[in-house]
Image (tube, rainbow, N blue to C red):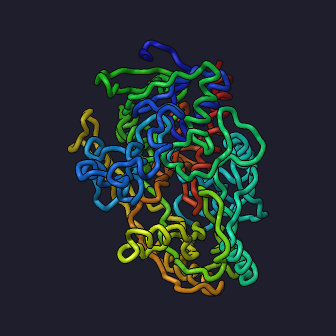
Amino acid sequence: MTHPNEQFDAIVVGSGISGGWAAKELCENGLKTLVLERGRMVKHIDDYPTANLDPWDLEFKGRQTVEEQKKQVKQSRTGYTTDAVSAHWFVDDIVHPYNEVKRFDWIRGYHVGGRSIMWGRQTYRWSEFDFEANKNDGIAVDWPVRYKDIAPWYDKVEEFIGVSGEALGLDVLPDGVFSPPMELNCAERDLREKIENTYDDGRVLTIGRVAHLTGEKTHEGRSNCVYRNRCVRGCPFGGYFSSISSTLPAAERTGNMTLRPNSIVHEVIYDPQTQKATGVRVIDTDTGEKMVFEAKVIFLCASSIATAGILLQSKSDRFPNGMGNDSGEVGHNIMDHHFKAGAFADVEGFEDQYFKGRRPNGIYIPRFRNIGGVTDQPNFKRGYGYQGGASRGRYEELVAELGYGQDLKTAVSEPGKWSMLLMGFGECLPYHENKMELNYDKTDQWGLPTITFDAEWKENEYEMRKDMVQQAMDMLEKAGYSNIRPWDEPGAPGLGIHEMGTARMGHDPETSVCNGNNQLHAVPNVYCTDGSFMTSASCVNPSLTYMAFTARAAAHAVAQLKNEA
């Protein structure tokens, strides 16, 4: 076990998508790095208990017991996370409580690897439209970086993690370093062709860009995706990117990483003489012991909410309202993506065709709203993309007459009808009043303050959702599909599991928390590289952008340390 008297060059708080990348880059550049994870140890392959279980191996048809359900009431709001095959990855809401002024679905995984084990793996670059959006719209603050600044780091990350996808040549969705794309099925190819022949506003349908290995390139310790579509359980083949299959092993191979699970970081320590951080305060969840670890540089990668919580708890004479919080923006500007808006349809024909395997991916229709000319909309700002796809399910009516005997066996051996789903993912604007705060009146079992959320969707998001539904229906109707059904379930922030924005980047400390290198304005050896630094949200899945900014920030930190040596 690591002891506080050990000396480190760097401390990384969190071991998920951003923490893994910070660890890899810092270690590969020669820094002795301590990675602190509040949750339990998880090892690749060894600790995927449900990875190879079939439905008949599960009790109660894979459902939780009533007692288990009581422990994960909030974690179950997704509708899938607390199924028996994946419930162990998500926290116990009783042990890890939080508070809601307005509903907020805080979906968490406390273990080595974090949510990189359970993420959706959709992997998209931001565009220049995204980095310029706040400035052009006069909303919140301007990003201090542009696409050209981050593009080389997207290259680096994509090359290492493996991203399968199709190059499209779109300004709104830049191409990347791709391995061969997964294949569209026959119904999806049909819709792709009909969209291409119907619209002149830049709409295109492609296969999703995902962090799954395909093609001939080798990735140490990992093999290609085998189309099991059991990703949320953990992949014993390493077919998709996670920190425990990829970046953390790379960091470990250097000999420079020390990984310490069961370690809750709750404060960054500030030295007023040097005006820098000296280390972090930690609670060992096994023993309850309180300790301090010291280092020259600190990377906060605990997730957007947790990182903001650490900053707010890091109080001193210099920072009475929390470290780096001169602007008062820490904890504010919470963003997520709103989704579950679009349409379903039945697809006639193709009865003689099926699909092979369980492709762990769907289609993607990139943003085609508010990017100039005929695409501009008067009722809302920013835009959205669609995910979804076509499938051929089993007969849904197998509940009565065909629910037993030979009739059942015959029916389930036959494929059902083709159906198509288009589901929008829309951008949320950064509202200062969407916030989280520390609640010192309600503490957790370690005596630390809990989080209280006060955030909501606003008019812009609701106006966008109307268009998400209408355009989905329009595309399905013009494709000639039948039984078109609109869908709109707004839910609450958090459900997209893309929470971000609580320690945003900006040009100055009066209006932002971090500078363009992910450093706290006021404490330059503290870097925030999880979702907390995001200044706006775009409409694409954000994890690739977190990884690219983390790699970039790590390179900056290494250079700074060399200059100071």
x, y percentage for residue 15?
A: 50, 35
In the displayed structure, 106 sits above or below 514; it is below
Q: Which residue extends farthest left? A: 441
Residue 396's spot in the image, x, y percent?
Answer: 45, 73
Asked whether residue 132 appears in the rendered view, the answer is no
How many badges with numbers are in the image? 0
Locate the C terminus by quadrant: top right
Residue at screen point 48% across, 13% down: 6
Q: Is residue 240 left or right of residue 464?
A: right
State which quadrant residue 424 falls in: bottom right
- Quarter of the image with the N terminus in it: top left
Q: Position of residue 201 (x, y in %)?
A: 71, 79
Query: Splitting the image into 4 quarters, where does residue 222 fall?
Result: top right
For the point 67% across and 75% down, which residue is it? 352
Q: Please tell me whether residue 405 is drawn above or below residue 55 in the rendered image.
A: below
Give 111 or 409, whichever is nearer the viewer: 409
Nearer the observer, 396 or 49: 396
Task: Determine the residue positioned at 53% across, 19% down.
Answer: 8
- Residue 549 drawn at (x, y percent): 62, 44
**386 relative position to 433: left or right:** right
Q: Nearer the viewer, residue 250 or 444?
A: 250
Q: Residue at x 38, y 71 (%)?
A: 403
Residue 123 against residue 401 in the figure, above or below: above
Q: Residue furthest front?
A: 406
Q: Is residue 399 visible?
A: yes
